[in-house]
Every structure is written in structure tokens, then in C-alpha cells.
């Protein structure tokens, strides 16, 4: 079995996708759609609403890798 090493660049934060998707409409499908359509405000609002990120922070960029790794760059 192969193992992969995920290196998260400085300034990016990995959020636990299992925890995130336990809240409202934060599904993998919705997250993928919001990222693809550059609707980061939708993602930002939900992450604030469910207390996943501090309300003082804003999602500047987001990546969902292989439906497994959820990374955000906050500002």
C-alpha cells in the first residue's frame, strides 16, 4: 500500500472534512461547487455560522483535494 505525504503550504490551514460536513449544508458536493464557482462567501458564511472558523477570519482561497483534504487560506 502506498502512503502519501501532504505538505500544506505556509498560510494554509487544513480543516477536518469529517467535522465540517457534520454541519448543515456543508456537504462535500456543496463545498466543491462553491469552490469551483468561486462562491467563497457561501463557504465563509457557513464556516462562521457553525463556529468552524473564527468570525474575525475570512476564507480567501479554498481547495478540496480528492474529496478528502479540505484546505483554506484565511485572512
Image: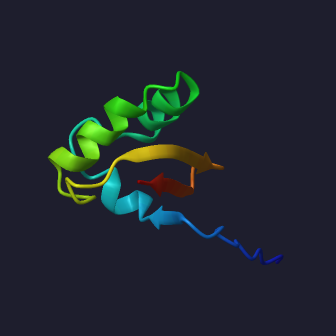
Q: How is the image coloured?
A: rainbow
Splitting the image into 4 quarters, where does residue 8 fall?
A: bottom right
x, y percent for residue 34: 46, 29
Q: Residue furthest right?
A: 2
- The residue sitting at 52% across, 34% down in the picture is 32
Q: Nearer the viewer, residue 45 or 70?
A: 45
- The residue sitting at 17% across, 51% down in the picture is 50
- The residue sitting at 45% across, 41% down in the picture is 28
Q: Where does the C terminus fall, quadrant-wise? A: bottom left
x, y percent for residue 7: 70, 73
Taking the image as shown, residue 10 lies to the left or right of residue 72, namely right
Q: Is residue 32 above or below residue 53?
A: above
Q: Nearer the viewer, residue 58 or 36?
A: 58
Q: Nearer the viewer, residue 45 or 33?
A: 45
Q: Is residue 25 above or below residue 51?
A: above
x, y percent for residue 43: 35, 38
- The residue sitting at 30% across, 54% down in the picture is 57
Amino acid at each position: 500500500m502506498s502512503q502519501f505525504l501532504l505538505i500544506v503550504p505556509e498560510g494554509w490551514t487544513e480543516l477536518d472534512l469529517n467535522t465540517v460536513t457534520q454541519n448543515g449544508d456543508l456537504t462535500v458536493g456543496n463545498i466543491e461547487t462553491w469552490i469551483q464557482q468561486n462562491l467563497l462567501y457561501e463557504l465563509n458564511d457557513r464556516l462562521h455560522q457553525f463556529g468552524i472558523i473564527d468570525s474575525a477570519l475570512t476564507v480567501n482561497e479554498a481547495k478540496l483535494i480528492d474529496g478528502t483534504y479540505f484546505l483554506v487560506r484565511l485572512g
